Amino acid sequence: MILDQKHARLQKLFRQFAETEFTKEILDRLDETGEFEWDIFRKMARYGFCGVKIPKEYGGAGGDYLAYALLVEEFARVSPVLSIYANTSNSLGGGPLMLAGSEEQKQTYLPPVARGEKIMVFALTEPGAGSDAGGTTTRAEEQPDGSFIINGRKTFISGAPMADWCILFAKTDPTQKGSRGISMFVLDMKLPGVSCGKPEHKMGIKGYPTCDLVLEDVHVPASALVGRKDKGFGYAMQTLDGGRLGMAAQGVGIAQGCLEEAIRYAKERKQFGKPIANFQAISFMLADMATETEAARQLVYHAAQLKDAGKDAGQACSMAKYFAAEAANHVAYKAVQIHGGYGYINEYKVERFYRDARIVPIYEGTSQVQQMVIAGTLLK
Amino acid sequence: MSEYNSSAIEEFSGIWVFCEQRDGKLMPTDFELISEGRKIADQRGCELTGLLLGSDVEGIAAELGGYGADKVIVCDDPALKVYTNEAYTNVVCDMVKERKPEVLLFGASNIGRDLAPRCAARLHTGLTADCTHLDIDMNTYVDFLDKNSNVDVANEKFKMEDVNLKMTRPAFGGHLMATIICPRFRPCMSTVRPGVMKKNEYDSAAAQKCAVEVVKPGIDEKELHEKVLEVVKEAKELVDLVGADVVVSIGNGASKDVEKAKALAQELADALGGGVVGSSRALVDAGLMSADRQVGQTGKTVHPKVYVALGISGAIQHKAGMQNSELIIAVNKNGSEPIFEVADYGLVGDLFKVVPEMITAIKAAK
Amino acid sequence: MKIYVCVKQVPDTSGVVAVNPDGTMNRSKMPTIINPDDLNAMEAALTFKDQNEDCKVVAISMGPPQAAEMMRELLAMGADEAVLISGREFGGSDTFATSQIVAAGIHHMGLEKEDMIFCGRQAIDGDTAQVGPQIAEKLHLPQVTYAVDIQKDGDTLTVRRALEDGYMKIQVQTPCLITCIKELNEPRYMTVKGVLECDEMPFTILDYEALKDEPLIEADTIGLKGSPTNIFKSFNPPVKGVGMMLEGTEKEMANDLAARLAEKHVI
C-alpha cells in the first residue's frame, strides 16, 4: 500500500525521533542494566507517542491503527525495546479501557496514560495459564458491598515494576468452566497486598523490566471492575487482537533494522579482494531478507487498514503477527550470518536484534496460537 | 544625498576594503583583504582605500598601507568604538554614497556578515558572500579558470572587455563553483572568507607613504536604537585550524569513542610535526566536537601542508574545506568513500587500529 | 505578540548529491529538508509561545508550491499559521530580491510594536547569511545576528550575539529581526497531534497578485530581473586524481605511508 500524506508525515516523525534520540549510549545502557529509562520515556510522552491511538476526547492524539503500527515499526527498527515503551499505553494498557471501560473509567485513567504521566500494564498470564488463558486461577471474590478481594499470582508481567495501574484478569465465578467466569479489573498498583517479584533476566528486550505480580488479599472497590462481570476473557482476546498488530509491526521493524545493517556490512566488508555483497551467496540472502520484510510489512499495514475500516481483522492480525514474527527471526538469523563472527559480538547491532527478535513469536500469542486462530477461522 | 544612484555605474571608481578592528586592533583578515584588494586595484589601475571605523584608531591605520593600501579613511567617533550594526551601517553607507567606490570588500567574519548585507540592501546593490577568488581583469580570470576548473578555456569565447568584479565562490557545498557579477549596480560588494586570500609581505616603506584621512561622522548616540551592554572575550581553547601546518580531522568513524579518537588524532598530529585536531560536520552536529574545530563549507577552510581525514566519508561540504591541502591522507573503513577521491594516500581500515600503527611508524621513520 | 519565522526548503546536501550532466546540482532528484538553522529560529519562537499564551507563531517562506509540505511540518511542530510566498514572478531571485519579497510578505501580514522576526543564520544551499539582515533593512528594523540567547522584557530584547572570540550582549527594541544559530537551542520535533491536525490549520499562499500593491514589490526589485547579482560562469573544480591506496595489514600500510612521507620530506 501507499501511505497517504498524513501517515507519511507520521512515519517521518517516528523515524526522525528514533534515529536521533535512541542513541547508542542509551541502547547500550538499556541492554547492560535492564533498567527502565525514564528520560527517553518522558521525551516520547512529550511528543504524544504514548497516546497515538487513544482518542482525542481521552487525551490522546486520535490516530488510527496504521499510525500506531508505523510508530512501533519505526521505533523497533532502531530499538525493539524502546518500541515497547510507547506501545503499551496504546495497546494492552489503554486498549481494554477503550474497549469496555465506563465513561468515568475512561476519563479517569486514559488521559494520564495517553500523556505518559501514568503507566498502565496488562496482566493476564499466570504460571499455569499461558497460551491457555482459560486456566486462570487468580481469584477475585465478590464481597457483599460489591467490592472484591483478589488473590493469586501473575507472571511475565512486562512493565509491572514501573506501573501505576494494571489491567488484571481474575476468576470471579469458579463454577464456570474454562475461559468463562473471568472478569477484567483496573488495579491500582499501590494498593496493600500488591507486590512485584524480582525482574527476570531476559534474553533480549532488556530495559523494560518484566516480573511476577503477587496479589495477597487485595481489596479493590466495585468501580475497579471493567466491563461486564464474568466476561473478561472476551475483552482479553479482543485486546490481544490489537496488541498482535503492534507486535507484528515490531517484527517488521526488527527485520528492517537487520536488513539495513546487513546491507551496510556486506558493502563494507571485504573478503577475497572484494566486498562480500558482490558474492551471490550474500546478495541472494539480502534479496530474501528484503522480500520477506516487505511481505510482512504489507500484511501488517493491511491488517491495520482493516481495523481502521471497522472490518473484522482477527484473521488478518494473526496472519500478520505470525508471518512478521517469523520473518524477524529469519532476517535476524541471516543478518548475523552475513556478519560472520562480528555478528556474534555485541559491538555490532545485529547481535542485539537477534536476541530481541526471539521473543516476537512468543509474546502476545505464540506463532502456534496464531496458527490455531488462522486454522480455526479457515475450518469454521 | 538624493543624487546617489547605484545604477549610474560610470560615477563609481576605486577599490575599498572595510577593515575591521576589535578593541582598537586590526583583524588578521584585514591584511589578507588589503592584499587581495591591491591585486584587483592594480588590475583596474585605480586606488586602493581602506575604510576603518572606530574610536581613536587613527594610529593603527598606516599599517594597512604596508600591505598595499594607498589610503585609509578613518571614521572616528566614540560611538564607533564597539561594533553596532546600526551605527556602522549608517557610516559605511554615508561614506559610499559620498565617495562612490566601484568595489567594496568585507571580511566574512561574524561582524562582516552582519554589516555587509545590510549595507548592500541600503545601497541597492548586489553582494556575493564568502568569495574565495576575485578578479577584474579578464586575462587573469581566464588564466584562473584554466588552472582551477575543468573549463576548456581554449575553446570558449569570453567577453574580454568585461570590467565587472568577478567574484568566485563555492556553491552547493563546494561541489560547484560559481562566478558572480553585479553588472548593473555599484559598488560591487563581496565578503571574503578569512584564511583564503594570501597576505602580501609587509612593506614598511609603503606603510609610511600611506595617506590617512580622518573623517568625523559626528554620531548622536541618543539617536541610536541598538545598545551594546557588554562585550565578553571568552577564554576559549584557541583552535587555529586555519593557520596550522598539520590538521588531523575525525569524523563519523570516530563516534564510538570520540575522546579516544581525539587523543589519537592529536598524537598523530604531533608525530607529523605538530598540529591541531579538526572535525567533520557530523560530529559537531552531534555535539561531540566543538564548532570551532569544524572543517568544511560551513566550518573553516584549511590548507595545511598535511591533512589527515580519519573516519570521514568525505561529503562535499567537508571536501570544500580541505581539498586544497598540500597532502591529504585518508583513513576509512570503507574503501569506496568519496574522501579517497581527493586523498594522496588512502588507508582502508578501522582508525582505532590504523592510527596507533601510523604513529609508531612515523615516529620510527623520523 | 506575533513572531514571524522565516524558513527555507533546501536540498539535503548531507547525503548523496544528484548531479545533472552539465555538472549542476539536480535539485529535483534530491530530498529536501527544512534548512537546519531555520529550525533553531522556529524553536526559539515556539519557546516564546510556550511561555506566552498570547504569542502567535507564523512560519513564512518563499519557494515553489512543493514547499507547502514543509509548511505543514512547521504547523505540526507548533506554528499557528503558515504563509508561503510563491509565484513565477519571484523565481530566480538573489538574496536582495528575496529579502525584498519576504519583507513585502511580512509587511502585508502586518508587523506590530511587540512583534519579532526570527531567521536562521544561513541556508545550507547558499551559505550567504544575507537574507535576514536584508529583510531587516527593508523593513527598517534593528537586527541582531548569530543569536545564542534571547531574553524579552516588554518591548526590550536582550540578545547574546556570538563572536568568533566571545560574545556581545545587545539590547534592541521590538519590532526587530534576529538570526539564530545552532547553539541557541535544540529544535523540537513535530508532535503526533500536530501531524494529525496540521492539514486543517491556517495556511496562506501569497502569490504575485496578493502582493503586487506592496510598496516593496516592483518589477525591477523582484525575481531574476530585480536581482543585482548574476551568475557569470559556473564550473566544476578540477577533480584531483585518485591517489594511491596503500595495501596490507594495518602495520604494513602504516610503514608504507611513513616511508613515503619520509621520502617526500614531509616528516
Image: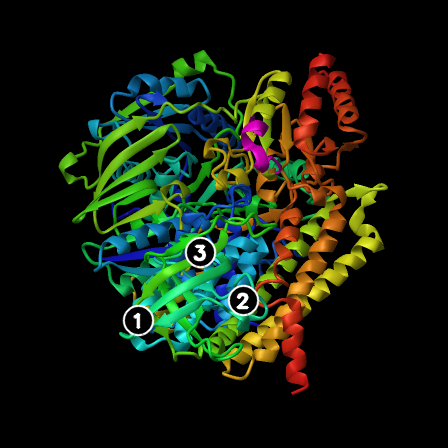
Counting every numbered tag in the picture gives: 3
Is residue B231 among the parts visible in the rendering?
yes
Secondary structure under tag 1 reads: loop
* Amino acid type at mark 3: Ala
Three-letter code for the amino acid on which mark 1 is drawn: Ser
Badge 3 vs badge 2, beta-carbon distance below 8 Å? no
The reply to the same-chain question for discs 1 and 3 is yes
Label 2 marks a residue whose chain is: A
Question: At numbered mark 3, what does the secondary structure look like: helix, strand or loop?
Answer: helix
Q: Which residues are magenta?
A: B253-262
Name the residue at the right extreme: A272
Q: Is residue B203 left or right of residue C40?
A: right
Badge 3 density bin: few <14, some 14–19, many ≥20, Cα 10 Å: many
Where is residue C15 drawn, in percent x and y? 60, 50
Q: Earlier in the sequence, mark 3 or mark 2?
A: 3
| Residue that badge 3 annotates | A160
Residue A168 screen position, x and y as percent: 43, 66
The kind of residue tagged 2 is Gly
Relative to the observer, which residue lies in front, C73 or B226?
A: C73
Mark 1 — residue?
Answer: A147
**Residue at the image point whose x is 52% and y is 23% from the top:** B243
Read off the residue under disc 2. A246
Report, in whole angstroms, how far the alpha carbon at label 3 lies from the one at label 2. 19 Å
Is the residue B138 above or below the residue A332 in the image?
A: above
Does residue C95 show up magenta in the picture? no
Q: Nearer the viewer, mark 3 or mark 2?
A: 3
Q: Is residue B261 magenta?
A: yes
Looking at this rendering, what residue extends furthest in the front direction? Answer: A175
Q: Closer to the camera: disc 2 or disc 1?
A: 1
